[in-house]
Amino acid sequence: MNPLINAYHFFSTQLRRGKAWKWFTLIGLIPSIIIIATLSFSLAGGWGSGDKSNIFLEITLNYFFKFYILLVPLFFSTSVLAEEIEQQTVVYLFTLPIDRGRLLLTKFFATLVHSLWLVGASLLPALILTNQHHLTSFETSKTISVIWLTALLGTLAYSAFSFLLGVLLRRPMLIGLFIVFPWEQFVQFMPGFVQKLSIIYFVKSIMPVALPEKASLLRLFQQTTPAPLAILILIGLSVFFCWAAMARSHKREYIMGEQ
């Protein structure tokens, strides 16, 4: 187990030294920055009782659930193997006396932790700011907690899916951009079973119903899957994607110069 722990620390250090997570931190804080700027320049009244809190909650939900929790996992998790291939280090990576499936899974966990941190640390301030006048309410605190945990679970599922794409494809980022953006955004408006052919369907099934009526993210979607079942499905999909990626890594041949 020590080699895997050492590998995890090595991969985590590489991620922290890179500039990508800093840029994604800044991107994730955009909703909070906008809200703080609005609060600073707006009049004292009207935020808690008017439409501003609902408007910014809608902006926050759409920003994170339609963009951020899709982009962050895609960028980091597809790079688990694609980055090694691009830098011509994949052959040397697999010379380590560690099972290649476990080694890739360890690197995936390192990227997953960073993705979860980015999403969690970016979303929570925005949710608190949009509900600042109601934080003492148990229902509001519960709603914020459920939204936050749902975002983390969605990040897990998208990360595992992106991990599998990175192992299966030579250009995972390009294909992934098409899948997680056009497809995930379009399929949620399709009727019947087709909606279930997406991760976002199950993510939004977990979202609490006690959200402002103007939150169009939920109004455009009718929940048909019970939240406990949706949670189990997302966890099951995450496990399956990781297992499939590990299994595929054993069968795929990697040669110097592969693009």
Image (tube, grey):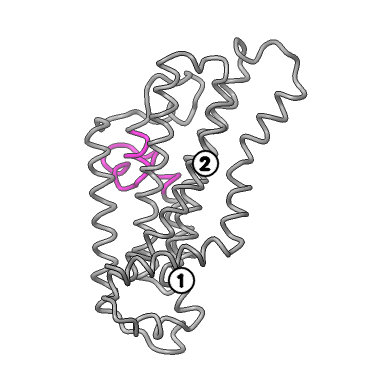
User: Identity of the amino acid at label 1?
Assistant: Arg
Left or right for 194, reference 64: left
Q: Is mark 1 on a helix, strand or loop?
A: loop
Q: In this view, does 15 lie above or below 32?
A: below
* Residue beneath disc 1: 171
The Cα–Cα distance between marks 1 and 2, rounded to whole angstroms, is 29 Å
Residue 27 spot, x, y in % from top left? 61, 47
User: Identity of the amino acid at label 2?
Assistant: Ala
Residue 140 spot, x, y in % from top left? 45, 18
* Residue beneath disc 2: 121
Per the rendered image, the range of residues in magenta is 184-205
> Front-most of 183 and 79?
79
Give neighbour class at mark 1: few <14, some 14-19, many 20+ (Cα, 10 Å). some
**Is residue 192 a member of the stretch shown in magenta?**
yes
Comes first in the chain, label 1 or label 2: 2
Q: Are marks 1 and 2 in contact (CB under 8 Å)?
A: no
Left or right for 75, reference 37: left
**Is residue 72 a member of the stretch shown in magenta?**
no
Q: Which residue is drawn at 28% across and 69% down?
A: 102
